[in-house]
Amino acid sequence: MDSLYHGNSSVSRVSLTYKKNVRWNLAHITNALMYGIINSILTIPTMYGYAVILFTHKDFAGFMPALSKLVIYSSAVHQVMFTLVSSLPFSIGQVQDAGLIFLGTMTTSICNSLGDDVPVKAKVTTSIVVISIATASLGVFLVVVGKLKLAALASYLPMPVIGGYLAFIGIFCFYAGLALCTGLVVNSFESMISVFNNAHDVLLCVPGILGGALLFIVSRRYDNSFILSGSILIMPIVFFFILLIGGISVNDARDGGWIDPAKDPATVSDLIGLFDFSLVHWDQLPKQFETWIGMAFIVALSSCLDIAAIELEMGKKLDLNHELKTGWLVKRRQWSAGRLYGVVYFLANYLHLPFQDQLSHRWYLRDYL
């Protein structure tokens, strides 16, 4: 009999194996939940910043609650789909910032082109539909790049080109940070300079700059992701603690510009109402082709570079072309769900590299594909 004997008792090996698997699965689920919470803390605030980059034009101001929710929803669709189909067992499929710049340029261009005579809702609907189509067609382009096995060509780019690309993205993220701090439209160098013309606007930027410096120092000095997540959580706690000891009410903070004005939350029907195809100005779609070309090549390049960075960290080769082709399925599903922007942010997977051995069986989502 296939059993173990100890004195007068016998314990089935099958029973021991079952208990061991139960304990392993419990630890596995606990770790998965822990990493999910950490990533939520890290990425959800980022999504709101991305919404500001996407919709910088003043015409979007009245629709930001609904547009922010739509950005969060589209990001969730992106992450679920990429986790299902990626060959990386630790993939989370966080969206990337590179494509945002180009899509934000499209939305601003559409609003400027339509002018003041067109209703604001028509501008919003046209912008959403156009950038959704741009994202879906970008997925097709990535499939072509993957099919033709052109991903490795990214390794031939000179470092100054890569550095300039990263700086280009960084300045737009800085614009979005200033816009979130002040509530102003900051989408150019001139508008950035104008922020510093008002002493109160400069004061509003101080907590954001100090918080960014803190997170930069923490991320550089500590490898533990818990410390970075904890730092993000501590900052709003410190802010409201200062309000408490200073005797400042939430309404007073709103009046001073420290908290966004109270707005009615966007409902599901509000999100669906944004997709009124009868309001779409289809003549704006071909006008964005030149911007789309730039986005396609920059996104393909940045994705290849991010995958190469993960290869370096893992110490083994990945199928770059497969990961690029994965984007087509992701973007096809996202477009049908009102997908707005972005491509996968492969470097966000760094957080999950220590988790890769436990995820090697991929039972958590891949079994449902």
Image (cartoon, rainbow, N blue to C red):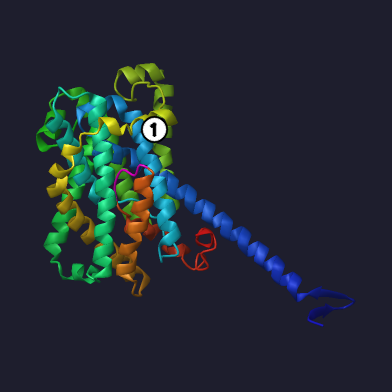
Crowd class of label 1 (few under 14; some 14 to 19; many from 20; radius 10 Å): few
Answer with left or right where residue 354 lies relative to residue 313: right
Residue 104's place in the image compared with 316, above or below, is above
Q: Is residue 124 magenta?
A: no
The spot of residue 56 in percent (x, y) is 22, 34
- Which residue bears the numbered disc 1? 272
Task: Using the image as rendered, state which of residue 47 and residue 76 is in the foreground.
Answer: 76
Task: Using the image as rendered, state which of residue 232 and residue 314 is in the foreground.
Answer: 314
Q: What residue sits 13% from the left and 27% below the top? A: 115
Residue 177 appears anywhere in the view: no
Magenta region: which residues?
Answer: 338-342
Residue 146 appears anywhere in the view: yes
Task: Tell me the element at label 1.
Answer: helix
Residue 90's place in the image compared with 98, above or below, is below
Answer with left or right where residue 234 lies relative to residue 220: right
Answer with left or right where residue 314 lies relative to residue 212: right
Task: Using the image as rendered, state which of residue 53 and residue 274 is in the foreground.
Answer: 274
Task: Using the image as rendered, state which of residue 63 and residue 90 is in the foreground.
Answer: 63
The part of the image, by quadrant, that contains residue 117 is top left
The part of the image, by quadrant, that contains residue 313 is bottom left
- Type of amino acid under label 1: Ile
The spot of residue 250 in percent (x, y) is 40, 20
Instruction: Pick out the residue farthest to the right.
Output: 8
